[in-house]
Image: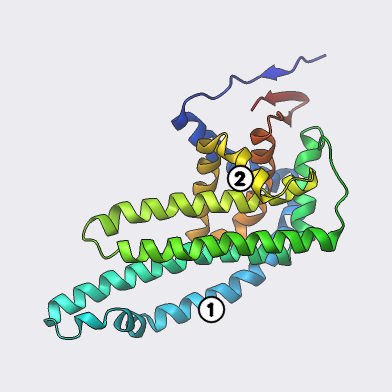
Amino acid sequence: MNAPRITAPVTGAVGRFFAGAGLLLRGLGLYVRSPGLMLLGVIPALITAVLFGLAFFALIYFVDDWTAAVTPFADDWSATARRLTRVIAGLALLGLAGMVGVLGFTAVTLVVGDPFYEKISERVEQRCGGTPDAVEVPFWASLRRSTADSLRLLAISVPIGIALFAAGFIPVLGQTVVPVVGATIGGWLLATELVGAPFYRRGKGLAQRRAALKADRPTALGFGVAVFLCFLIPLGAVLIMPAAVAGAALLARRSLGQPTVLSRGGQRSVEPS
């Protein structure tokens, strides 16, 4: 009989950050193990991506009008200063749309594809030994609660996004530090949103999953930022969404102190939290 191989725990904030990003890679592994299930998860993401893509292209098309509307103070400046200010405003506006758009895309896709993503999340948990203390949650009750939580997270992201938009006008910092801060905040909100299903399966709400993720913030950030950056790539959100749901199930287990167990060629590899 093959004995379980225990993986050494990851220590240090940087190590835990990259371990969190690695959870997304492990989610991608399900494309090999369950290709049919994962491809079904692409369908709702594709539907939502078309709608959000059209909105984003409309924003790009009218970006000159929008930047002029938010920078009326530059109307009387010299042509060079006015053009530079509005280029910076355009970049900041697209950055705001990117952060809010990624979170909005995730919220809508999780609602549209709830049966598919619930199945993916459950499959991951089954392969990790099942869900301890699972509770039966009626579909409509779960849908209402997840929708309400997603709307609350989006409501948080909008004022943060506006503040980052304003900070984007600061020379140098607005084009270097602000995008990093935006990706970090967006990643945190994204991780909080994606782990909803595993926590609901245990009868835990938004406040409880926030507290659990805060206990190992570097891991949650590593996962969330990796997903956030992938979602910014054209078609990345469509292809990565099922893997993000799978990785979120692993993240939820780690944050709750429950080991993940993967089958590897007849052996079982146990990775403690």
Quadrant into which the C terminus falls:
top right
- In this picture the colour scheme is rainbow
Left or right: where 266 falls relative to 273: right
* Rendering coords of residue 92 (x, y %): 34, 67
Give the labeled residue for mark 2. Answer: 210
Label 1 neighbour load within 10 Å: few <14, some 14-19, many 20+: few
> Which residue is at a point 13% across and 77% down the rendered structure image?
80
- Against 246, is 46 above or below? below
For residue 219, above or below residue 56: above
Label 2: state its secondary structure: helix
Residue at 68 percent across and 46 percent down: it is 246
Q: In this view, does 111 lie to the left or right of 222?
A: right
Q: Residue 151 carries which label?
A: none
Q: Between residues 247 and 180, which one lies in front from this camera angle?
A: 180
- Circle 1 residue: 54
Position of 68 with respect to 93 (left or right) is: left
> What amino acid is found at the position of numbered circle 1 in the picture?
Leu
Tell which tag, 2 or 1, sits nearer the viewer.
Answer: 2
